[in-house]
Amino acid sequence: MAHNLSQKILRDHLVSGKMEPGSEISIRIDQTLTQDATGTMAYLQFEAMGVPRVRTKLSVSYVDHNMLQQDFMNADDHQYLQSVAAKFGIYFSRPGNGICHQVHRERFGVPGETLIGSDSHTPTGGGLGMIAIGAGGLDIALAMGGEAYVISMPKILGVKLVGSLQPWVSGKDIILELLRRLTCKGGINKIIEYHGQGVDTLSIGDRFTITNMGAELGATTSIFPSDKVTKGYLEAQGRGNAWKELSADKDAAYDRVDIRLHIENDARAIAALKEGSAISLTISQPDKSGFVNVEFDGITIDLNKLEPLIAQPHSPDNVIKVSELAKQNIKADQACIGSCTNSSYYDLSIAAHMLKGNSINPNTSFTLTPGSKQVFEMIARNNELADIISSGARILESACGPCIGMGQAPPSGGVTVRSFNRNFEGRTGTMDAKAYLSSPETATATALVGKIADPREVAKDLNIAPLDREEPGKYLINDSMIIPPATDSEKVEIVRGPNIKPIPQFDEMPETIKGKVLLKAGDNISTDHISPAGAKVLPLRSNIPAISEFTFTRIDQEFPKRCREWGGGFVIGGDNYGQGSSREHAALSPRFLGVKAVIVKIFNRIHRANLINFGILPLTFADANDYATIDFADELALENIREQLKAVGQKGQVVLKNLTKNKEIKLSYDLTERQKQILFAGGMLNMAKRSR
Ligand code: MIC
Ligand code: SF4
């Protein structure tokens, strides 16, 4: 039988289960990665498992998120991570070496292998033809211990690319176009596989930008074939022997997929899908709440027709043409190039090329972050750095930086145009800032003229020729900032500063879950809302009692206090609940504060898995209209919940009593036997302890 590329790699790594969409499969994991902000928790959990050395082919620990070192806490975390890596057989990428996803693809990624990482943008590796998936820290710890990774088999959505990109249009515009058509929930439970002649025309950098930001579609991962372009890149990185050719079988098919969209709220996406790009599309009649089921066999994007695009505040799928916004004269206070989406050598080079001989606008601050030491050193040695500095732009060290609110917050109510991947409210560090997401070309054009600008127009006005999108034939290789694990690991002492606190202990699931509605949230709640990041909070990632005090405070200052006063309870949410980061703190902190169940319309995959791992019951409304029947502070009860969950199989319904309204409603669950056992035990760690 003919297979597509995703199926082939999954089949080669399958440990158990049937590869039928929706059923649980477990796969062997070749590589893992962690970053500092989720890594400390992952390694504390790994230590608790008592495994002497990682059992993967390769595990790497990166430090890239928090490098401000405002006090001892941050520096202590770095020391802990370095010593744990040395002891347990893990490579350590030092602070300054670059952003995990950028460095991983440069130095470690291997076509055809599996990678899981405690960061939601781990799918970047799909640009090399890997199955690369973001997960919670505990899942990474288990994989490092040699356990297979469990997921529900996704559907494979085929995206066919035809034609080739026009000057000043780049990979970022392709993924923004997909976000426009599919929305942030369109990729949920899907792998997005790119195919077609247009793939051959894309540089490796374009491919990485696309697979990286597939995370914003909610996709399990995204993947490109491993072809001549991949070979050239690996050879230029001195790793030609890691290459192998990989693509879908000739007559392989893709799955028919469905997306639940709202007839009004998602009108733009529905219209875009109808434009003819979605293959054999059908749309159901709207239900009572205005939702339709959109079904199709695949999508085609004509690269010739693509224009520069931009995502407007406050969601990556709020996409329109840059040319339309440019007409509105929107003054930009800031522009930024960087983040794991667009900080490659080409991204910095195109900016340098546009800046050469020009000055940035006096009212716009322009920051550039080379994604890795390799990129930084290369632009330094070929003088592009000089062109950047001379233009008045500000250069930052190779790290996540402004992408995660670690500095460079825009002014009050300010406009910032960023080559990043997320623009959730408040993520910049300024609550009322307006963040736009664009290509590096658009961000640089904006910095030059001081308002949101179309790079094609700016290039014409300033007489800038387009740059060849070819990658260099040889990258500068210097791995001095990557420390291999110790050979005499018994001698390594783990350094544990006072900020490294043990993981809290949790109780088993009770027979009946009872409590009040602590918070009623709307649609698209991101993990940034649940457990914010930024300079104030990130240093507390290894200290659950302390970080819990920030839970939900972006939308409700009183949340932690109320949890204590009411003795925990329920959280209610809408569509796409828990989108964004893979941080397990968004499950751990609510659990620490006593949240026992979360009831929403649709969950994000990684966050839902994290809730289960930490013993919080994830349920969805059987009828989405029931969302309206529950109010803040209502008293709810799930009586005999263990019995109710045991009674039926993987998918079923339980009864929720609303004691305040004297009303019963039905809630749905989708839990495998293993997931039920994790929840009954009060979380994965309790369960793992029992089985040892
Ligand atoms: C993000 O982009 O939100 C982060 C910060 O990289 C997170 C990880 C984290 O919260 O530490 C992610 O994407 O998973
Ligand atoms: Fe870092 Fe931003 Fe990428 Fe997250 S999205 S890994 S914060 S650069």
Image (cartoon, rainbow, N blue to C red):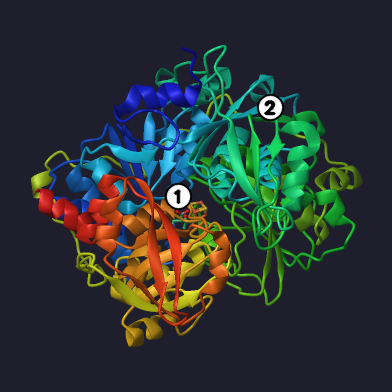
Q: Which three-letter amino acid code belongs to the residue tagged 2?
A: Leu
Give amino acid for label 1.
Arg
Q: Can residue 491 be seen in this view?
A: yes
* Left or right side of 585 for 484: left
Q: Where is residue 512 in the image (x, y as percent from the top left)?
A: 27, 70
Q: Does the residue labelled 1 lie within 8 Å of ligand 1?
A: no
Crowd around label 1: few <14 · some 14–19 · many ≥20 (10 Å): many
> Does residue 422 sit above or below 234 in this rendering?
below
Residue identified by numbered label 1: 605
* Residue at the spot 21% in from the left edge and 36% down from the top edge: 55
Q: What residue is shown with label 2? A: 161
Give SS at disc 2.
strand
Q: Vertically, is 424 above or below 291?
A: below
Q: Residue furthest bottom?
A: 565
661 lies left or right of 56? right
Disc 1 is placed on an element classified as helix
Where is residue 470? Give x, y as percent.
Answer: 66, 27
Residue 80 seen from this side: no
In the rendered image, residue 44, in percent from the top left (x then y), is placed at: 22, 57
- Residue 307 image-quadrant placement: top right
| Residue plotted at (21% across, 51% down) | 46
Q: Which of 524 and 447 is in front in this view?
A: 524
- Mark 2 is surrounded, within 10 Å at the Cα level, by few (under 14), some (14 to 19) or many (20 or more) other residues, namely many
Task: Please name the residue shown 51% across and 38% down the image.
Answer: 190
